Image (cartoon, rainbow, N blue to C red):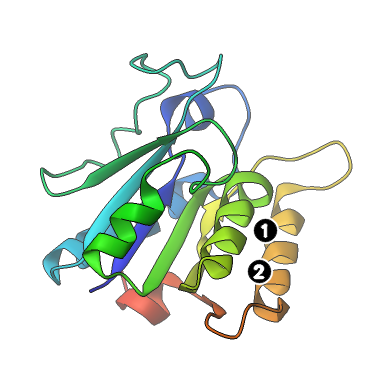
């Protein structure tokens, strides 16, 4: 079963003041991945980050409306960059028999990166969707370069013997979407 994990695609960070690199296309690719996953009996997991900018239950905490969810989708709430830390994600994945996790979302250098590394450390194979994660410009580096850098890192990262990280485009995994 395909398991798509969509990280922190929430109003507080996507419809706020910080511009996000290639935002419209990233959202479209994630939606395509989610639609495909559901159509092929996979599971879609939305991870939501809660903090002072996105209080649980607030409009900022909600997943953006451009990524609608269905009754079969799963929600995981977290307060750290690691989607596994202090959440039931690992238990849920073990119960469902997930082996390969397809990961995407926001922000590249924080929650997406940390969660990809944690997933590999927990023994999962990971497919990082190279064109379906985003971030904003930082004082020292433009968002496009952050995305490029992390795609390179994930392509070359050493993982435990029982896992691997692969970097693929959304089209390579789910077929063309436009």
> Where in the figure is residue 83, as x and y percent of width and height?
49, 46
Instruction: Write the residue at 27% across / 71% down.
Output: 2
Q: Where is 165 relative to 53, above or below?
A: below
Q: CA distance from mark 2 to mark 1?
A: 6 Å
Q: Where is 130 relative to 167, above or below?
A: above
32 sits to left or right of 60 = left
Looking at the rendered image, the quarter that the N terminus falls into is bottom left
Question: Which corner quadrant of the image does residue 174 belong to?
Answer: bottom left
Question: Which corner quadrant of the image does residue 120 belong to?
Answer: bottom right
Instruction: Write the residue at 59% across / 46% down.
Output: 111
Looking at the rendered image, the quarter that the C terminus falls into is bottom left
Instruction: Write the residue at 41% across / 67% down.
Output: 102
- Identify the element where label 2 is drawn: helix
Q: Are marks 2 and 1 in contact (CB under 8 Å)?
A: yes
Question: Which corner quadrant of the image does residue 152 belong to?
Answer: bottom right
- Identify the element where label 1 is drawn: helix
State whether residue 31 appears in this view.
no
> Where in the figure is residue 109, as x and y percent of width and height?
69, 50
State whether residue 82 appears in this view.
yes
- What residue would you read off at disc 2? 151
Give me the disc on residue 147.
Answer: 1
The residue closer to the viewer here, 8 or 135, is 8
């Amino acid at each position: 079963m395909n398991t798509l994990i969509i990280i922190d695609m929430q109003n507080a960070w996507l419809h706020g003041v910080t511009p996000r690199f290639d935002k419209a296309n990233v959202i479209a690719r994630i939606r395509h991945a989610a639609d495909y996953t559901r159509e092929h009996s996979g599971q879609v997991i939305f991870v939501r980050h809660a903090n002072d900018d996105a209080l649980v239950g607030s409009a900022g905490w909600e997943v953006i409306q451009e990524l609608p969810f269905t009754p079969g989708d799963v929600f995981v709430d977290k307060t750290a960059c690691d989607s596994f830390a202090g959440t039931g994600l690992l238990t849920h994945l073990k119960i469902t028999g997930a082996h390969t996790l397809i990961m995407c979302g926001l922000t590249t250098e924080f929650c997406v990166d940390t969660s990809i590394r944690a997933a590999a450390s927990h023994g999962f194979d990971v497919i990082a969707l190279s064109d379906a994660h985003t971030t904003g410009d930082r004082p020292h580096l433009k968002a496009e370069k952050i995305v490029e850098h992390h795609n390179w890192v994930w392509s070359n990262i050493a993982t435990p013997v029982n896992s691997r990280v692969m970097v693929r485009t959304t089209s390579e995994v789910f077929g063309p979407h436009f």
